[in-house]
Amino acid sequence: MKKIIHVDMDQFFAAVELLDHPELKGLPIAVGHDAERGVVSTASYEARRFGVHSAQSIQVAKRLCPQLIIIEPHFHRYKEVSAQLHDIFHDYTDLIEPISLDEAFLDVTDNKHGIELGVDIAREIKQRIRETTNLTASAGVSYCKFLAKIASDWRKPDGLTVIHPDKALDFIAQLRVEKIWGVGQKTADKMHHMGIFTGADLRQMSLNRLQQEFGKMGQVFYDFARGIDNRPVISEWERKSVSCEQTFEKDISQNTDVTIHLYHTVLELVRRIEKNDFEGRTLTLKVKFEDFQQITRSITVDHILRTKDDILPLAKQLMHSVEYHSHPIRLIGLGVSNQKGTTYQAQPRWIQLELEFKEKPTKFAKNP
């Protein structure tokens, strides 16, 4: 049986800022750019009591919490601390799958210290993180990534939860579907209309019905309801794309403004391609409108996209088919993917993306 740990730092960006600015301890703070279109990266627990949360508009956050202190992010500092965390992880296993700067999956089935129980490793890691960085982490332990991730969220902050294989099905049965990976608000609403509110309800649905309603995700939901998740912890991965985007202070709808911002986005994309030494043949344009509707359009060519001269004409071609004069734009993004390449597509292809990631049956979530 696999032993998987999910480590998730508590209010990471905010916690690092509090290390560097201890005078702010106990005050409601949010990390983000304080501008009209700024977004909260992380909120302290004091701020969360007012309803402030990550991915929220800074302006909304300030209305919810008028005394909110906004701190500009310092990503170089967060990366330094993240490197310290990974040094600790590598002392136990090299099977580490980073999810972001502040969380990762660890496969400790065959660990470097020969420790039998995953919970003992998780406890040691939490203690060493505290001693090394003066920060707290929450950890979840189970036999698969799906349950380890849920377990790490169970008793935040500074939590440690184990979901034992023998208790997994009972645990999932009482789990609200909103807690299941891949179930965002729209999917949850659809499930509720189908009479699905808990893992037990989900388990009653046939695979065919779930696939009819949710496509490929139907198989995932069917498996998760039964405690099945065979995804391995992937310690090495191949970069599949390079992208960048910018959100504007004010919505844009004039040709000149769109052209200028598209040009600068192309330059930033070229810089990132060079930095990552990436080779791709598919260019994707993402546009988010003033009402937060989002579309993406892609085109694939038969040569590597490296330079401004390679990318800019294609970006203009994709943008030309976007109606923005009566539908102002708040965000433009560009990305290059498809390293191996496919057949050239003379016409751009539409792709509509919607990726949603989003009580506690404590009697089944046992703490060691």
Image (cartoon, rainbow, N blue to C red):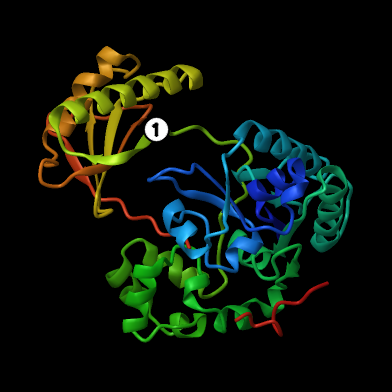
Q: In front: 88, or 253? A: 253
Q: Would residue 9 be visible to someone looking at this image?
A: yes
In the picture shown, does residue 325 fall above or below 1? Answer: above
Q: Position of residue 127 (x, y in %)?
A: 86, 54
Q: Position of residue 218 (x, y in %)?
A: 37, 68
Q: Would residue 3 be visible to someone looking at this image?
A: no
What residue do we see at 43% from left, 19% from top? 271
Q: Secondary structure at mark 1?
A: strand
Binning the other alpha carbons within 10 Å of mark 1 as few (below 14), some (14 to 19) or many (20 upward) gives some
Task: Please give left or right for residue 334 compared with residue 84 in the image.
Answer: left
- Disc tally is 1
Residue designated by label 1: 244
Point out the image quarter for the C terminus: bottom right
Q: In front: 46, or 4? A: 46
Point out the image quarter for the N terminus: bottom right
Task: Please give left or right for residue 121 compared with residue 167 in the image.
Answer: right
Q: In front: 135, or 305? A: 135
Q: Amino acid at mark 1?
A: Cys
In the picture shown, does residue 121 fall above or below 242? Answer: below
Task: Please give left or right for residue 200 compared with residue 263 in the image.
Answer: right
Q: Quadrant of residue 194?
A: bottom left
What residue do we see at 61% from left, 59% from top? 145
